[in-house]
Image (cartoon, rainbow, N blue to C red):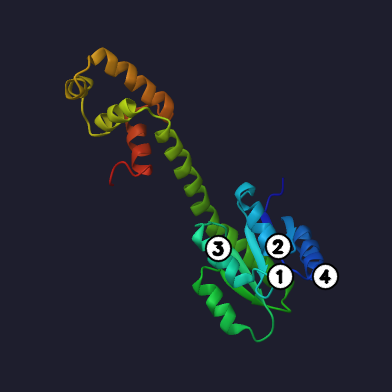
Amino acid sequence: MTTKGTIYVIDDDEAMRDSLNFLLDSAGFGVTLFDNAQSFLDALPGLAFGCVVSDVRMPGIDGIELLKRLKAQRSRFPILIMTGHGDVPLAVEAMKLGAMDFLEKPFEDDRLVAMIESAIREGEPAARNEAMGQDVAARVASLSPRERQVMEGLIAGLSNKLIAREYDISPRTIEVYRANVMTKMQANSLSELVRLAMRAGMLND
């Protein structure tokens, strides 16, 4: 496993792909190459977090269209756009669509490496947060309707007795549901359950 992160290079120019592969590999990154944006989008659901380095002008889906699609999918991958000489208006549009930065070809190797390092540093916490959010949402989704009611009662600060009275079931049964909720939510304490509920948007901070 590489230490510095994963880079996804998208460029229809084979010579450019090869030179970027060599440069980024030497700089300690894991590199995956795509010769068009569609094949990257097709692979995206299975890809680990990484920084995308894409050319702006490509046949089919160009860099701008790629940004639009990634934005629509709420992708957390930071994107650097490479532009040819004089493509500043395109580069500005790319930034408006969420590109972290743009680089005019020909560029200095060190500058690209520095930009990638900073893009990964900035993008990683958000991506990690989002993965955690999805994980918590999946735990909540695994609860039965009754378990969810019990969880809502617990995070509202109600005792087992009060929850039991509200749903007209015995406190003993509530204890069973409560244990199920703690197991499914992977919470060791009530305070942890409350934190998870906040993360899942069940509680307004």
The x and y percentages for residue 194 are 32, 35
Residue 109 image-quadrant placement:
bottom right
Q: Which residue is mark 4?
A: 15
Please tell me which residue is depicted at 34% across the width and 44% down the height of the picture: 201
Q: Which residue is mark 2?
A: 9
Q: Mark 2 and mark 1: span between their CA atoms?
A: 17 Å
Asked if labels 2 and 4 touch by Cβ distance under 8 angstroms, the answer is no
Q: Secondary structure at mark 1?
A: helix
Q: Secondary structure at mark 2?
A: strand
Q: Is residue 84 above or below residue 172?
A: below
Q: Mark 1 and mark 4: span between their CA atoms?
A: 19 Å
Q: Mark 4 and mark 2: span between their CA atoms?
A: 12 Å
Q: Is residue 39 above or below residue 111?
A: above
- Neighbourhood count class around disc 4 (C-alpha, 10 Å): few under 14, some 14–19, many 20 upward: few
Tag 1: residue type? Asp
Tag 2: residue type? Val
Residue 64 image-quadrant placement:
bottom right
Name the residue furthest bottom: 86
Say which mark, if any, is on residue 194: none
Q: Which residue is mark 1?
A: 110
Mark 1 or 3: the one toward you: 3
Q: Secondary structure at mark 3?
A: helix
Tag 4: residue type? Ala
Q: Mark 2 and mark 3: span between their CA atoms?
A: 17 Å
Q: Which residue is mark 3?
A: 69
Mark 2 or 3: the one toward you: 3
User: Which one is earlier in the sequence, the residue at label 4 or at label 3?
Assistant: 4
The x and y percentages for residue 63 are 62, 70
Mark 2 or 1: the one toward you: 2
Tag 3: residue type? Arg
User: Which one is earlier in the sequence, the residue at label 4 or at label 2?
Assistant: 2
